[in-house]
Each structure stands twice: as structure tokens, then as C-alpha cells.
Image (cartoon, rainbow, N blue to C red):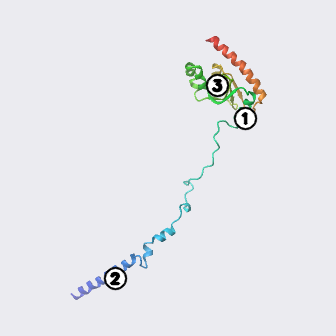
């Protein structure tokens, strides 16, 4: 009996010591509090800035290289545009005109007939002072496709059916203003002949 009482007293004493030490350990003033529960100040001082975080290069958002300014005409087309203006100061020059849009000017029947040309266009349309279409001008590199099935010939035939002659120049061999003047004069004669043919067929 005495042994049992002594065991109970010893267990009570051990439990009391454990409770007291645990209270001191988790108290803000306890000596061991930093080891288990770091203070807010310590957390803030040890926090790394977001800019210091090492990110995976594959997932980092990096500044994309600055894009070139979006332009309607590239360098060669700009040179040709200004030469067209120089060669024909009294003409109106329009850039990037769709063939389907030109067909619509002729009416619905022509637009339906050239529906397959939707999405294709010419680099320049030359108009007279009254905005009557004189000629179409294309700036294109030569391709491997030749003959009647080549894209150039398909476009030429489509424009020819609308009474619009097509002049094709190469970017590496741009004509001077005098050459353009002569070729446009020839195109005007050609267009008048095409219009005469259209009238006689109607």
C-alpha cells in the first residue's frame, strides 16, 4: 500500500515538472521558444523578396524582344510606291487591294465568278484623276511555278477579265520613274482596248 502511494506521488511530481517545462517552452518569454515557434519579426527578416527567388528558366516570364513596327508596305514596296507617285503625279495610287474587291466593282456576277480569288490581292492599283482603274501592279519574286497554272498567270487572267492590265515587277530589279511612266502609258492603251472588247461582247 505504501509502495502504491509512493508511486502515485512520484508520477504526480513528474507530471507537474513536465507541465511546468512545457508552459515555459511555449511561452513568448521562454528560453526555447525560438527553437519551436519562430517569432514574427524573425520570419519577416528572413523572408526573401520575390525578385530574389530563383525561378526555373523554362517557366520565367522574360521580356520578349521588341517587335518591329507593323507596316502596310515593306521596304521594296515603299520604294516602288514613291516611284509610282513620282512617275504619275496626277494619278491616284492605292496599296494592297483585293482582287475580289475589284470584281465587286463590276457587279455581283463578276464577284461570283471570281469568288475563288478571295484572299488574294495586288500590291498597287493605279487610278486616274476620276478614280477610274488604269492598271494593277504586283511586286513579286519569281517562282518555280510557270505556265497557265502559276499564281501570277491566274491573277493576270482574273484581272484581264475585269479589264485591268497587270504589271509585275521584281523586288531586286525595281524600275525607275521614267520606265514606270512608259509602262503605265502602255497599260492605259491596253486597258482601253480591253474595255472596248468588253463593250463589244456585251
Q: Which mark is residue 17?
A: 2
Q: Which mark is residue 79?
A: 1
At x 57% / y 22%, what residue is drawn? Answer: 111
Mark 2, Cα crowd under 10 Å, few <14 / some 14-19 / many 20+, is: few
User: Who is closer to the viewer here, 46 or 177?
Assistant: 177
Q: Earlier in the sequence, mark 2 or mark 1?
A: 2
Whole-percent x, y for residue 195 in the image: 66, 16
Tell me: 27 left or right of 63.
left
Mark 1, Cα crowd under 10 Å, few <14 / some 14-19 / many 20+, is: few
At x 48% / y 69%, what residue is drawn? Answer: 43
Of circles 2 and 1, which is in front? Answer: 1
The answer to whether 3 is drawn above or below residue 106 in the figure is below
Tell me: 179 left or right of 92.
right
The answer to whether 140 is drawn above or below residue 24 in the figure is above
Residue 173 occupies which quadrant of the picture?
top right
Label 3's element?
A: helix
Of circles 1 and 3, which is in front? Answer: 1
**Gap between marks 2 and 3 measured at Cα:** 100 Å
**Gap between marks 2 and 1 measured at Cα:** 95 Å
User: Who is closer to the viewer here, 154 or 136?
Assistant: 136
Residue furthest left as drawn: 1
Whole-percent x, y for residue 74 in the image: 68, 37
Q: Are marks 2 and 3 in contact (CB under 8 Å)?
A: no
Q: Which mark is residue 147?
A: none
Label 2's element?
A: helix
The answer to whether 54 is drawn above or below residue 127 in the figure is below
Label 1's element?
A: helix
Residue furthest bottom as drawn: 2
Residue named by callout 3: 155
Whole-percent x, y for residue 24 in the image: 38, 79
- Image quadrant where one finds the N terminus: bottom left
Amino acid at each position: 500500500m505504501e509502495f502504491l502511494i509512493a508511486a502515485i506521488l512520484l508520477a504526480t511530481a513528474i507530471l507537474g515538472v513536465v507541465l511546468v517545462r512545457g508552459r515555459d517552452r511555449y511561452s513568448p518569454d521562454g528560453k526555447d521558444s525560438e527553437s519551436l515557434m519562430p517569432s514574427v519579426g524573425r520570419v519577416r527578416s528572413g523572408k526573401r523578396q520575390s525578385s530574389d527567388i530563383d525561378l526555373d528558366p523554362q517557366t520565367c516570364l522574360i521580356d520578349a524582344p521588341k517587335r518591329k513596327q507593323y507596316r502596310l508596305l515593306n521596304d521594296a514596296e515603299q520604294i516602288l510606291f514613291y516611284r509610282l507617285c513620282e512617275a504619275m503625279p496626277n494619278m491616284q495610287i492605292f496599296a494592297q487591294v483585293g482582287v475580289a474587291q475589284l470584281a465587286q466593282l463590276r457587279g455581283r456576277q463578276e464577284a461570283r465568278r471570281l469568288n475563288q480569288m478571295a484572299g488574294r490581292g495586288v500590291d498597287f492599283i493605279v487610278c486616274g484623276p476620276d478614280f477610274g482603274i488604269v492598271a494593277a501592279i504586283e511586286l513579286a519574286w519569281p517562282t518555280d511555278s510557270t505556265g497557265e497554272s502559276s499564281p501570277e498567270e491566274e491573277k493576270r487572267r482574273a484581272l484581264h477579265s475585269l479589264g485591268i492590265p497587270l504589271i509585275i515587277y521584281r523586288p531586286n530589279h525595281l524600275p525607275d520613274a521614267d520606265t514606270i511612266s512608259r509602262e503605265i502609258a502602255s497599260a492605259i492603251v491596253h486597258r482601253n482596248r480591253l474595255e472596248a472588247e468588253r463593250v463589244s461582247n456585251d
